[in-house]
Image: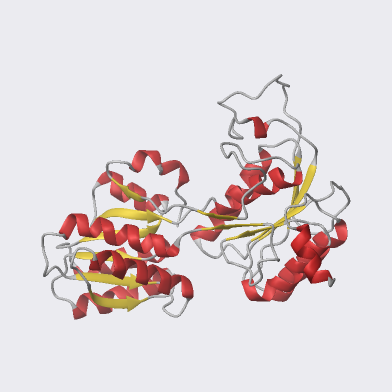
Amino acid sequence: MSARKNLRRMLGVPAALAASALLVAGCVSNEPPEEENDSVSQDDGAGGTANDEPGDNVVIGFSAPAADHGWMGAITRSALDTAEQYEDVELRQAEATNDVNMQISHIEQFINDGVDAIVLLPFDGDALTEVALDAMEAGIPVINVDRELSSPFASRATILGDNYGMGVSAGTYICEELGDQPDAVVAEIQGIANLPLTQDRSQGFEDALSDCGLEVSTQVAADFTIQGGETATSNLLQAEPEIDAIWNHDDDQGVGVLAAIENAGRDEFFMVGGAGSLDVMEHIQSGDSVLQATVIYPSTQAADGIKLARLIAQDKDMADLVSAGAPHTIQLYAPVVTADNVDQYLDLGFRS
């Protein structure tokens, strides 16, 4: 049987616990708590389940792209914060990079050092698949976050946002607001148009709108940057003299979107954002702009990956599930944040 085929049997087998020195930059080691408790209460920062009680010490390698976007910065920060909550976790953070070859070398270093698990948000899922397979073959479970690797054998578990679900949530909300206006003008501001995630978001949006007889009147594409958002929105506003609703896919580019709207002096419509930045939530809370809602694309995915990596490395089951072992795939929910529920999501928001 080939080494690759052996992975089929290795999936679900917990990695051997090991600890060794690592040369990768940004090593984070957690100090023991000042006070020892006999049990973990429901108020503990780590979550308060039986799984949060200290277990075997584990070393987790973490690698993610450069934090050149508010959401990406938040996903790394939440991963570090989560690891710091556990005295039995030593997190080794590779230098964040958008250089595929450098990220591959970081994973190779983790393999050489025999970490107990790897949390990997790849810059390019296809390009990182081979080295992830190498880690799995070495008995190191890989927790794949957000951008999927191209082989089912390249990860023990995968945590994903729901791009299609974001579109469905945004479209459903707009239907609830405009469903009795069949001639309503609905516009859409995408991120980078040719990315699969953008196409999934747009398809979900189209499907949800069609359910109430609406459709996208004008669609423009930005590039997930503030400047791109401002330029695309200026073009949109010139093309559509009267708009009822806009869905902007990304709250970071939304800073530019709002600037263009303000410069144009337009406010006859309401807007729904995407991702869940704290800036947008504060606008929703104050009611001082056209922003009426946003759709969450969780920036806590890597934090979930840290928790799952610890769980798998310690050979524990997932709390609240009857079945044994951690799930292979988790797709996170894309809820709509409005003035009615924004208070419960503020802690999950990130700065653009």
* Residue 41 found in image quarter: top right
The answer to whether 327 appears left or right of 30 in the picture is left
Q: Point out the residue furthest to the top here.
A: 38
Q: Can you give x and y, in whole percent of width and height, for residue 36 in the image? A: 73, 21
The answer to whether 18 appears left or right of 238 in the picture is right
Q: Can you give x and y, in whole percent of width and height, for residue 173 in the image? A: 26, 56
The one nearer the camera, 325 or 127, is: 325
So how many labels did they put on this image? 0
Q: Quadrant of the C terminus?
A: bottom left
Q: Point out the residue furthest to the front here.
A: 1
Q: Residue at (63%, 72%) from the top-left corner?
A: 150
Q: Is residue 101 above or below residue 261?
A: below
Is there any visible trace of residue 135 in the rendered image? no
The answer to whether 105 appears left or right of 290 in the picture is right
The answer to whether 123 appears left or right of 89 in the picture is left
Is there any visible trace of residue 231 in the rendered image? yes
Q: Quadrant of the N terminus?
A: bottom right
Q: Can you give x and y, in whole percent of width and height, for residue 158 in the image? A: 61, 58
Q: Residue at (73%, 25%) from the top-left corner?
A: 34
* Residue 82 found in image quarter: top right
Q: Residue at (44%, 64%) from the top-left corner?
A: 163
Q: Residue at (82%, 57%) from the top-left corner?
A: 139
Q: Can you give x and y, in whole percent of width and height, for residue 223 in the image? A: 43, 75
Q: How is the image coloured?
A: secondary structure
